[in-house]
Amino acid sequence: MGLYLAGVIKMRRRGDRWSMSATILWMIGWLIFIYITNGAPGVYGRVLFSMHMVMHMALMMAVPIFLVLGTPITLALRTLPKRKDRTLGAREVLLAVVHSRYAAFIANPVVAGVLFFGSLVGFY
């Protein structure tokens, strides 16, 4: 959460615009995560199976949606500096991962959907 906000501040200081809604969605995702793990679901999830399942489902279905809508990869690519000496930095590694064949395969909506629903069936 801190690195995300640092990136937003860096963009604002240099005069670039960053979506306030993306920042709010990112924060909502982390607030849900904190509540689910430390609030009532986290406490009662240790003794009630139903609340334990609410925790699992919220962590698998609610939190990722908000975090993805915060577009952290885009923010990182816009704020991380480019290396001029042709060595690998954080931005270059992130670009390599995002443009890899593996990422293209996993990010395909059909593959992602099958993995998501298949993991639910397999786990539960």
Image (cartoon, rainbow, N blue to C red):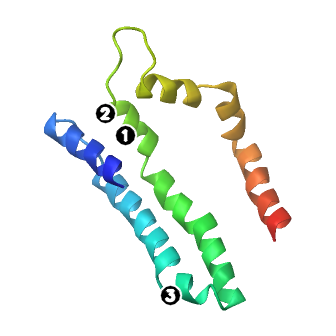
Quadrant of the image for the N terminus? bottom left
Work out how far the residue at label 2 is from the one at label 3, CA to CA, in angstroms: 37 Å
Determine whether label 1 and label 2 are within 8 Å by CB: yes
Quarter of the image where one finds residue 8: top left
Q: Which residue is mark 1?
A: 75
Work out how far the residue at label 3 is from the one at label 1, CA to CA, in angstroms: 32 Å
Q: Is residue 47 above or below residue 107?
A: below
| Residue for point 36% across, 62% down | 27
Q: Which residue is mark 3?
A: 40
Quarter of the image where one finds residue 109: top right
Q: Nearer the viewer, mark 2 or mark 3?
A: 3
Query: Who is closer to the viewer here, 44 or 65?
Result: 44
Q: Which residue is mark 2?
A: 79
Type of residue at label 2? Thr
Type of residue at label 3? Ala
Other residues around mark 1 within 10 Å, as few (<14) / some (14–19) / many (≥20): some
| Residue for point 28% across, 51% down | 5
Q: Is residue 98 above or below residue 20?
A: above
